[in-house]
Image (tube, rainbow, N blue to C red):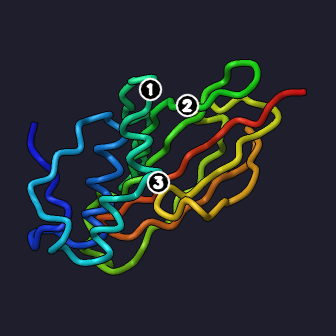
Amino acid sequence: MPDLAVGTTQICYDASRMQLALWAVLAAPLIMSNDLQTVRPEIRALLQNRAIIEVDQDPLGIPGQCVLISNSIQVWLRPVMPTNNIGLRSFAVAFANVGNHEECPLCPLTFTIVLQDLGFTNQMGYTVYDLFDSKHILGLFKPKDEFTVRINPSGVEFYKFKPEDIY
Protein backbone atom coordinates (compact mmCIF):
# COMPACT_ATOMS: atom_id res chain seq x y z
CA MET A 1 0.00 0.00 0.00
CA PRO A 2 1.55 3.35 -0.97
CA ASP A 3 1.76 6.03 1.66
CA LEU A 4 0.05 9.41 1.61
CA ALA A 5 1.71 12.20 -0.36
CA VAL A 6 -0.06 14.75 1.86
CA GLY A 7 2.48 17.28 3.08
CA THR A 8 5.03 16.67 0.35
CA THR A 9 6.03 19.40 -2.04
CA GLN A 10 4.62 17.45 -4.99
CA ILE A 11 0.94 18.24 -4.33
CA CYS A 12 -1.03 21.36 -3.46
CA TYR A 13 -3.26 21.84 -0.41
CA ASP A 14 -6.51 21.01 -2.29
CA ALA A 15 -4.97 17.81 -3.69
CA SER A 16 -3.80 16.93 -0.17
CA ARG A 17 -7.36 17.31 1.10
CA MET A 18 -8.65 15.13 -1.74
CA GLN A 19 -6.11 12.40 -1.11
CA LEU A 20 -6.90 12.32 2.61
CA ALA A 21 -10.69 12.27 2.07
CA LEU A 22 -10.56 9.46 -0.49
CA TRP A 23 -8.15 7.46 1.68
CA ALA A 24 -10.69 7.70 4.52
CA VAL A 25 -13.65 6.79 2.29
CA LEU A 26 -11.81 3.73 0.98
CA ALA A 27 -10.97 2.62 4.54
CA ALA A 28 -7.29 2.39 3.58
CA PRO A 29 -4.55 2.54 6.20
CA LEU A 30 -3.32 6.08 6.75
CA ILE A 31 0.40 5.52 6.26
CA MET A 32 2.61 8.61 6.15
CA SER A 33 6.30 8.88 5.40
CA ASN A 34 6.58 12.52 6.40
CA ASP A 35 7.41 14.05 9.76
CA LEU A 36 4.49 15.87 11.41
CA GLN A 37 6.96 18.21 13.10
CA THR A 38 8.27 19.54 9.79
CA VAL A 39 5.12 19.84 7.62
CA ARG A 40 3.27 23.13 7.23
CA PRO A 41 0.73 23.81 10.02
CA GLU A 42 -2.29 23.46 7.70
CA ILE A 43 -1.02 20.04 6.52
CA ARG A 44 -0.41 18.94 10.12
CA ALA A 45 -3.99 19.94 10.94
CA LEU A 46 -5.24 17.83 8.01
CA LEU A 47 -3.24 14.78 9.04
CA GLN A 48 -4.37 15.08 12.67
CA ASN A 49 -8.04 15.73 11.86
CA ARG A 50 -9.86 13.44 14.30
CA ALA A 51 -13.14 13.47 12.35
CA ILE A 52 -11.43 12.20 9.19
CA ILE A 53 -9.35 9.64 11.09
CA GLU A 54 -12.60 8.45 12.71
CA VAL A 55 -14.11 7.89 9.25
CA ASP A 56 -11.01 6.00 8.08
CA GLN A 57 -11.02 3.79 11.18
CA ASP A 58 -14.80 3.34 11.39
CA PRO A 59 -15.68 0.09 13.22
CA LEU A 60 -18.08 -1.05 10.49
CA GLY A 61 -15.04 -1.54 8.25
CA ILE A 62 -17.10 -1.11 5.08
CA PRO A 63 -15.06 0.56 2.32
CA GLY A 64 -16.79 3.29 0.39
CA GLN A 65 -17.22 3.53 -3.34
CA CYS A 66 -17.82 6.01 -6.10
CA VAL A 67 -21.60 6.08 -6.51
CA LEU A 68 -21.95 8.87 -9.05
CA ILE A 69 -19.92 10.61 -11.72
CA SER A 70 -21.38 13.81 -13.15
CA ASN A 71 -19.13 15.69 -15.55
CA SER A 72 -16.05 16.54 -13.45
CA ILE A 73 -17.56 15.57 -10.09
CA GLN A 74 -17.24 12.19 -8.42
CA VAL A 75 -19.40 11.37 -5.39
CA TRP A 76 -17.88 8.85 -2.98
CA LEU A 77 -20.04 7.30 -0.27
CA ARG A 78 -19.10 5.23 2.79
CA PRO A 79 -21.48 3.88 5.45
CA VAL A 80 -20.15 4.70 8.93
CA MET A 81 -21.24 4.78 12.57
CA PRO A 82 -23.30 5.93 14.35
CA THR A 83 -26.72 4.56 13.51
CA ASN A 84 -29.98 6.12 14.62
CA ASN A 85 -32.53 4.45 16.92
CA ILE A 86 -33.89 2.17 14.15
CA GLY A 87 -30.50 1.22 12.72
CA LEU A 88 -30.12 3.62 9.80
CA ARG A 89 -26.42 4.31 9.24
CA SER A 90 -24.52 7.55 8.91
CA PHE A 91 -22.56 8.20 5.72
CA ALA A 92 -19.30 9.91 4.92
CA VAL A 93 -19.63 11.60 1.53
CA ALA A 94 -16.79 13.07 -0.53
CA PHE A 95 -17.53 15.32 -3.49
CA ALA A 96 -14.36 15.33 -5.61
CA ASN A 97 -13.62 17.66 -8.53
CA VAL A 98 -11.42 15.53 -10.80
CA GLY A 99 -12.05 17.23 -14.12
CA ASN A 100 -9.97 18.94 -16.72
CA HIS A 101 -9.64 22.55 -15.60
CA GLU A 102 -8.33 24.13 -18.81
CA GLU A 103 -11.35 26.44 -19.23
CA CYS A 104 -10.94 28.05 -15.85
CA PRO A 105 -8.15 26.50 -13.79
CA LEU A 106 -8.98 28.58 -10.69
CA CYS A 107 -12.78 28.35 -10.77
CA PRO A 108 -14.63 26.12 -8.30
CA LEU A 109 -17.51 24.03 -9.63
CA THR A 110 -20.96 24.07 -8.07
CA PHE A 111 -22.66 20.70 -7.72
CA THR A 112 -26.21 20.04 -6.50
CA ILE A 113 -27.87 16.72 -5.72
CA VAL A 114 -31.13 15.64 -4.10
CA LEU A 115 -30.24 13.49 -1.09
CA GLN A 116 -32.65 10.68 -1.95
CA ASP A 117 -30.66 10.26 -5.18
CA LEU A 118 -27.79 9.12 -2.94
CA GLY A 119 -30.08 6.62 -1.19
CA PHE A 120 -30.73 8.77 1.88
CA THR A 121 -34.23 7.79 2.99
CA ASN A 122 -34.56 8.85 6.64
CA GLN A 123 -37.69 11.02 6.70
CA MET A 124 -36.47 12.73 9.90
CA GLY A 125 -33.46 13.95 7.95
CA TYR A 126 -29.71 13.99 8.36
CA THR A 127 -27.56 16.40 10.31
CA VAL A 128 -24.60 17.29 8.10
CA TYR A 129 -21.11 17.93 9.48
CA ASP A 130 -18.15 19.34 7.56
CA LEU A 131 -15.39 16.80 8.20
CA PHE A 132 -12.61 19.28 7.43
CA ASP A 133 -14.08 21.61 10.06
CA SER A 134 -15.80 19.26 12.50
CA LYS A 135 -17.20 22.18 14.52
CA HIS A 136 -19.15 23.36 11.47
CA ILE A 137 -22.64 21.87 11.23
CA LEU A 138 -24.32 22.65 7.92
CA GLY A 139 -27.81 21.87 9.20
CA LEU A 140 -30.58 19.32 8.84
CA PHE A 141 -31.39 17.98 5.37
CA LYS A 142 -34.32 15.75 4.42
CA PRO A 143 -34.30 13.17 1.59
CA LYS A 144 -36.07 15.49 -0.89
CA ASP A 145 -33.77 18.45 -0.10
CA GLU A 146 -31.09 19.61 -2.49
CA PHE A 147 -27.53 19.64 -1.20
CA THR A 148 -25.16 22.05 -2.95
CA VAL A 149 -21.37 22.21 -2.72
CA ARG A 150 -18.67 24.34 -4.35
CA ILE A 151 -15.52 22.38 -5.06
CA ASN A 152 -12.14 23.82 -6.01
CA PRO A 153 -10.28 22.38 -9.02
CA SER A 154 -8.51 19.18 -7.92
CA GLY A 155 -10.33 19.63 -4.62
CA VAL A 156 -12.86 17.87 -2.43
CA GLU A 157 -15.59 18.64 0.05
CA PHE A 158 -16.10 15.99 2.72
CA TYR A 159 -19.16 15.59 4.97
CA LYS A 160 -20.77 13.24 7.45
CA PHE A 161 -24.53 12.75 7.15
CA LYS A 162 -25.88 11.52 10.49
CA PRO A 163 -29.49 10.25 10.50
CA GLU A 164 -31.82 11.78 13.05
CA ASP A 165 -33.74 9.50 15.39
CA ILE A 166 -37.31 8.51 14.52
CA TYR A 167 -39.73 9.13 17.37
Q: Amino acid at mark 1?
A: Pro
- Percent position of residue 85, x then y: 76, 23
**Can you tell which mark lies on residue 59?**
1
Q: Quadrant of residue 125?
A: top right
Q: Secondary structure at mark 2?
A: strand
Q: Is residue 21 above or below residue 42?
A: above
Q: Nearer the viewer, residue 2 or 101?
A: 2
Q: Secondary structure at mark 3?
A: strand
- Residue at left 76%, top 36%? 164
- Percent position of residue 65, x then y: 37, 32
Query: Disc 3 or 1, which lies upstream in sequence?
Result: 1
Q: Secondary structure at mark 1?
A: loop
Distance between the Cα atoms at labels 2 and 1?
7 Å
Q: Amino acid at mark 3?
A: Phe
**Can you tell which mark lies on residue 158?**
3
Q: Nearer the viewer, residue 97 or 19?
A: 19
User: In this rendering, would 77 be left or right of 142?
Assistant: left
Binning the other alpha carbons within 10 Å of mark 2 as few (below 14), some (14 to 19) or many (20 upward) gives some
Q: Could you tell me which quadrant the C terminus lies in?
A: top right
Do the residues under discs 2 and 1 have CB atoms within 8 angstroms?
yes
User: In this rendering, would 3 be left or right of 48?
Assistant: left
- Between circles 2 and 3, the one closer to the viewer is 2
Binning the other alpha carbons within 10 Å of mark 3 as few (below 14), some (14 to 19) or many (20 upward) gives many
**Can you tell which mark lies on residue 81?**
2
- Percent position of residue 38, x then y: 15, 74
- Residue at left 60%, top 48%? 113
Spot the residue most to the right: 167
Distance between the Cα atoms at labels 3 and 1?
19 Å
Q: Amino acid at mark 2?
A: Met
Query: Disc 2 or 3, which lies upstream in sequence?
Result: 2
